[in-house]
Image: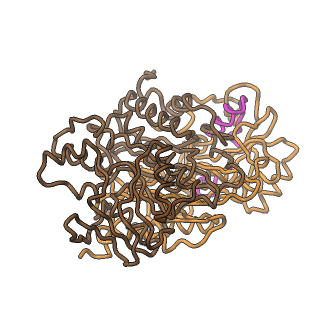
Chain colours: A orange, B brown
Amino acid sequence: MKSKNSLSGLGEFGLIDRISAHVGAGAGVITGIGDDAAVTSLSPGMQLLTSTDMLLEDVHFRRSWHPPRLLGRKSLAVSVSDVAAMGAIPRWALLSLGIPAGLPLDFLDDFIDGFLAVAEEHAVTLIGGDTCFSRGGLVISVTIMAEQYPELIVRRSGALVGHEIWVTGALGDAALVLELLERNDAPDDPSLSARLHDPTPRTAAGFALAESGLVSAMIDISDGLLADFGHIAEQSGVGGELYLEQMPTSVGFRRYAARHPAFPHHLVLSGGEDYELAFTAPPENREKIYAAMKKCGVEALPVGIVTSCPEVRVLLPDGSCYIPQKSGFTHFA
Amino acid sequence: MKSKNSLSGLGEFGLIDRISAHVGAGAGVITGIGDDAAVTSLSPGMQLLTSTDMLLEDVHFRRSWHPPRLLGRKSLAVSVSDVAAMGAIPRWALLSLGIPAGLPLDFLDDFIDGFLAVAEEHAVTLIGGDTCFSRGGLVISVTIMAEQYPELIVRRSGALVGHEIWVTGALGDAALVLELLERNDAPDDPSLSARLHDPTPRTAAGFALAESGLVSAMIDISDGLLADFGHIAEQSGVGGELYLEQMPTSVGFRRYAARHPAFPHHLVLSGGEDYELAFTAPPENREKIYAAMKKCGVEALPVGIVTSCPEVRVLLPDGSCYIPQKSGFTHFA
């Protein structure tokens, strides 16, 4: 008899039981884990929002850099961030895991623990998934479902010329940590490290912006502001000017920048994985947006303006202008 | 400039554009591929059914055995089968791909072609997904969404003592083909090979059985009848007797069996991936079920009976009885 303390002893269905034991009832969940499909019920009048993310070992994360509990947290957080960027209310998640031979059961327990902690923080219920053996590295696939009234959903396509471009929080932290790790130079500031390993999806801010009707377009910053605002610009048929001086950075980021002569602008503009929100809004909404964000405990700043010129340009402090060629992280490039 | 005829030339967003160019409008789709999340609208009064499957190279499939077009077909078909087993109407799918270096663009095109062909056959619209680079093999993750009126959804938990156990189609073909491939003995019968490489989800049959209210529990046979009926038994708090003699097999399977003295019972009972339906129903519904299945062009046969004894046993032609220990495919074992 194999030990129940190893994955091979536990088996596929034992693992599923082990996970589902920690999942409680959730809003709108009729049938959760355990049938051929989960059954859920949308709130009356709301539409369904769905997004999915795949995280692969040594592509999106390294096991040696990323503690399993934080990896579990991040796996759900990045998907929650997608529906937050449309102003939706996250509800249900599916989690699929491809598990390499020899992965310790402790790793899985910690991973699930982190995943379910983020689920609880954002009122998300795990309703299903798939588990299988992987001959490669750890494979994680998460699907998130959310809901919102149709008239409140914020898309990428609504930006209008003259609207201000805003970002929440601070930019570049996650990319800075990644760069330091790649240089074998672990950041000394745990709050900075957390920005890569344990990002906070802006659920409350996204919902507040949607509900208030103050914003015209929104996206989450996963591939860097230049690339992600680029998606808004493309889908709205507009362009934009971003003011480098106004980009918000964290204390930790600025402390690093002060020690290094070449200020890493590219991390702020093109670094990925901050999972902040970028949105556009008419200038007359500025004070109301400050107030709404303050209520959510989230900083937000206007950092640019939507233009009719079909390109995204960065204005530098000396008045010169930079029009980027490569605008963010893209796979296969 | 890299060639648009290679994946690295095309890039992540080029690949997404290439896929979405082939996706048309779909029922209930408000916003499809291209925003942070897809937006869909359920039919009034219906609930949402969601299921997800992960397929990993050299675990679930081998590229050398599985032509890319059929792999694309199967990737969606196995998920459609899950919601068919609950009697639901498949609607929307998400597709995530982790793509290894050097995978030919032709392979991807054929894969997508097959995936979208099955989507069209079952009125499913691809509404989103994720694409990324994989350092291991090809990674495929599919989420299917379906809808159905709450009172028509068929679960695993409704089987009652005295109900008959039914299966659609024929059992063991997929497992037989897999066994032959593993012996480097490619099956000479293309219709037999298709049963492994291109399974047919029983969407119409599942829906007809749900709508008619004739059945008490249902599941799709992905891990072998013994294991999958075992799930019905467990969740319904019952047991079952299966009659080996009555198990439906295909002409191709019987031809193989005739040439081999040891008739491969285990393939019929414990072979996976047939994606037929197993369901239970009161005996008085027998004729109506035959009629409903005939209308769908699907064969179905009663092959056992639900019992109060909490185990699943197989009755052999000589009157003896076999109580299996290991009941089907399970990962990590």
> Residue A241 vs residue A16: left or right?
right
Task: Say above or below: B224 vs A303.
Answer: below
- Where's the N terminus of chain B, which quadrant? top left
> Residue A195 vs residue A86: left or right?
left
**In-front residue for pair B226/A129:** B226
Residue A54: x %, y % from top left: 48, 49
Is residue B31 within the magenta segment?
no
**In-front residue for pair B288/B276:** B288
- Where's the C terminus of chain B, which quadrant? bottom left
Bounds of the magenta span? A227-255
Residue at the image position 32 percent from the left and 60 percent from the top: B331
Residue B138: x %, y % from top left: 36, 42
Residue found at the far left of this picture: B261
Is residue A235 within the magenta segment?
yes
Q: On the image, which quarter does residue B252 sit in?
A: top left
Residue B243: x %, y % from top left: 30, 63
**In-front residue for pair B56/A61:** B56
User: Which SS type dominates the magenta stretch?
Assistant: helix
Regarding residue A183, the answer to whether it shows in the image is: no
